[in-house]
Each structure stands twice: as C-alpha cells, then as structure tokens.
Image (cartoon, helix red, strand yellow):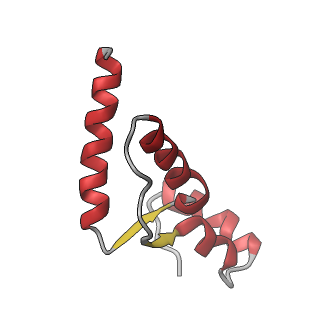
C-alpha cells in the first residue's frame, strides 16, 4: 500500500470513530456533498458505508430561511468588516 493510501486509511478510520461517536454531524452542504464523498472513500478503501446519522446542513438551512435575498447578500460583506448585523 502506498504512503498516500495508508494516510487516507488512517484519516478514514479516525473520521469513522468520530462519526460513530457523534449524535449529530454539521456542515455546509454535508448531506449532498461531504458525506457522499466520504462514504465513497470508505467503500473504496474497504470500509462499510457510514450509518444513518442526524445531520444539520447549514446550506439547506440557509437557502430555506425566511431571510430575504438582499439581506443574505449583505451579511458576508458585514462579517468581513467585523460589524454586527441586526
């Protein structure tokens, strides 16, 4: 096994341990991007698929929120300037 593959297997083992221990996993577009990619890597390297898990996907929450599109566009600029909104 190449060094890169060994490192990938080590990362996947650590991820699996943390994932299995967690009650909830959170990420931005985690349901349709991160977890499918990680699951594919798990299968590719001989691990079983990830089990079901409660997720909090900030991208899906953000796009479904009641905040108006113009307000959404202003937020990142305000955050970069270090000001508070509200």
Image coords of residue 27 (percent x, y) = 47, 61
Q: Horizontal placement of 76 versus 53: left or right?
A: right
User: Which residue is depicted at the point 62% across and 70% down?
Assistant: 60
Residue lying at the far right of the rendered structure: 69
| Residue 20 placement (x, y as % from top left) | 29, 63
Task: State the residue in front, 45 or 81.
Answer: 45
Query: In this picture, is 19 found above or below 10?
Result: below
The picture quadrant where one finds residue 21 is bottom left
Q: Is residue 12 left or right of residue 26?
A: left
What count of labels does the image hold? 0
* Residue at the far bottom in the pictured view: 66
Viewer-closest of 26 and 85: 26
Q: Position of residue 49 (x, y in %)?
A: 44, 54
- Picture layout, residue 46 above or below residue 1: below
Residue at (53%, 82%) from the top-left corner? 86
Q: Residue at x 52, y 59 (%)?
A: 30
Quarter holding the N terminus? top left
Q: Residue at x 37, y 44 (%)?
A: 47
Which residue reaches farthest top? Answer: 2
Given residues 52 and 27, the one toward you in this image is 52
* Image coords of residue 83 (percent x, y): 47, 66
């Amino acid at each position: 096994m190449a060094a890169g593959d060994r490192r990938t297997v080590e990362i996947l083992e650590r991820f699996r341990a943390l994932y299995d221990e967690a009650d909830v996993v959170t990420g931005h577009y985690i349901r349709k991007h991160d977890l499918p990619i990680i699951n594919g890597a798990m299968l590719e390297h001989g691990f079983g698929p990830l089990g079901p898990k409660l997720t909090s996907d900030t991208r899906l929450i953000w796009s479904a929120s009641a905040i108006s599109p113009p307000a959404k566009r202003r937020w990142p600029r305000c955050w970069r300037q270090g000001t508070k909104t509200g």
